[in-house]
Image: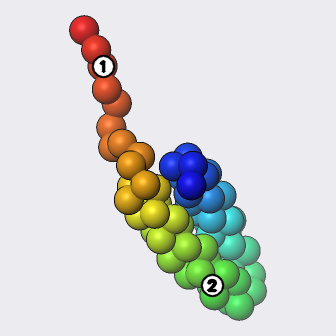
Amino acid sequence: MNKWLPLVAAIALEATATLSLRAALDHPAWFALAAVGYLGAFIAQSMGLRAGLGIGVLVSG
């Protein structure tokens, strides 16, 4: 499994959840999608970390 795919999924899920929070101001049912989106983002990010995706920036000097 490519270690970048879970990161891309986490970004997409978090963006979806954030937009859902904005929509929830008018229709509270959107809170469910926001909760699922944030939960999915955390799961996808942990999958990426388990696959070997590094944390931080490596600077070689």
For disc 1, the marked residue is 59
Q: Secondary structure at mark 2?
A: helix
Q: Amino acid at mark 2?
A: Phe
The residue sitting at 74% across, 86% down in the picture is: 27
Q: Position of residue 12 (x, y in %)?
A: 65, 58
The residue sitting at 51% across, 76% down in the picture is: 39
The residue sitting at 62% across, 84% down in the picture is: 31
Q: Position of residue 15 (x, y in %)?
A: 64, 59
Q: Which color scheme does this rendered protein use?
A: rainbow
Q: Is residue 41 left or right of residue 25?
A: left
How packed mark 1 is, by other alpha carbons closer than 10 Å (few <14, some 14-19, many 20 or more), is few
Q: Position of residue 35 (x, y in %)?
A: 56, 81
How many numbered badges does the structure rendering display?
2
The earlier-in-sequence mark between 2 and 1 is 2
Q: Which mark is residue 16?
A: none
For the residue pair 32 and 1, the one nearer the viewer reads as 1
Q: Quadrant of residue 49?
A: bottom left
Q: Amino acid at mark 1?
A: Val
Q: Can you see residue 25?
A: no
Q: Can you see residue 58?
A: yes
For disc 2, the marked residue is 31
How packed mark 2 is, by other alpha carbons closer than 10 Å (few <14, some 14-19, many 20 or more), is some
For the residue pair 51 and 8, the one nearer the viewer reads as 51
Looking at the image, is mark 2 or mark 1 nearer the viewer? Answer: 1
Q: Secondary structure at mark 1?
A: loop
For the N terminus, which image quadrant? bottom right
The residue sitting at 74% across, 81% down in the picture is: 26
